[in-house]
Amino acid sequence: MGVIAHFADCIVVTHDNKILLQQRPETGAHPGALCAFGGHVEDGETVIQAGQPPFRSPGLIGNLPPVV
């Protein structure tokens, strides 16, 4: 039996109805591709918790309210 991986993605829509994407680095998997924000869901973490770290990084966007 194979390994099951869980992922969380977050689609961000701006106030003027544009979708915000990130561009992958030129090294690694899918170089330069545009994609949604997200990543692996760690053990003991919910999908909601896994989708928030990119937006909670200091200096990136600011202090966002909790997502419910």
Image: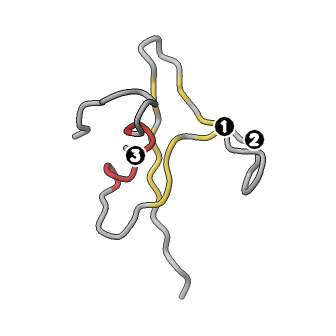
> Distance of mark 1 from mark 2, alpha carbons?
6 Å
Residue 32 disc label: 2
- Colour convention: secondary structure
Mark 3 residue element: helix
Could you tell me which residue is drawn at 40 percent across and 46 percent down?
53
Could you tell me which residue is drawn at 38 percent across and 53 percent down?
50
The residue that label 3 is drawn on is: 53
Disc 1 to disc 2: CB gap under 8 Å: yes
From the top left corner, tell me how far across and down residue 5 is, in percent.
49, 69
Mark 1 residue element: strand
Answer with the quarter of the image where residue 1 lies.
bottom right
- Name the amino acid, label 3: Pro
Taking 41 as reference, is 64 above or below it? above
- Name the amino acid, label 1: Gln
Please name which of the two marks, 3 or 1, marks the residue nearer to the observer: 3
Mark 1 crowdedness (10 Å alpha carbons): few <14, some 14-19, many ≥20:
few
The residue that label 1 is drawn on is: 23
Q: Residue lying furthest front in this view?
A: 58
Left or right, 11 with reference to 32: left
Could you tell me which residue is drawn at 49 percent across and 74 percent down?
4
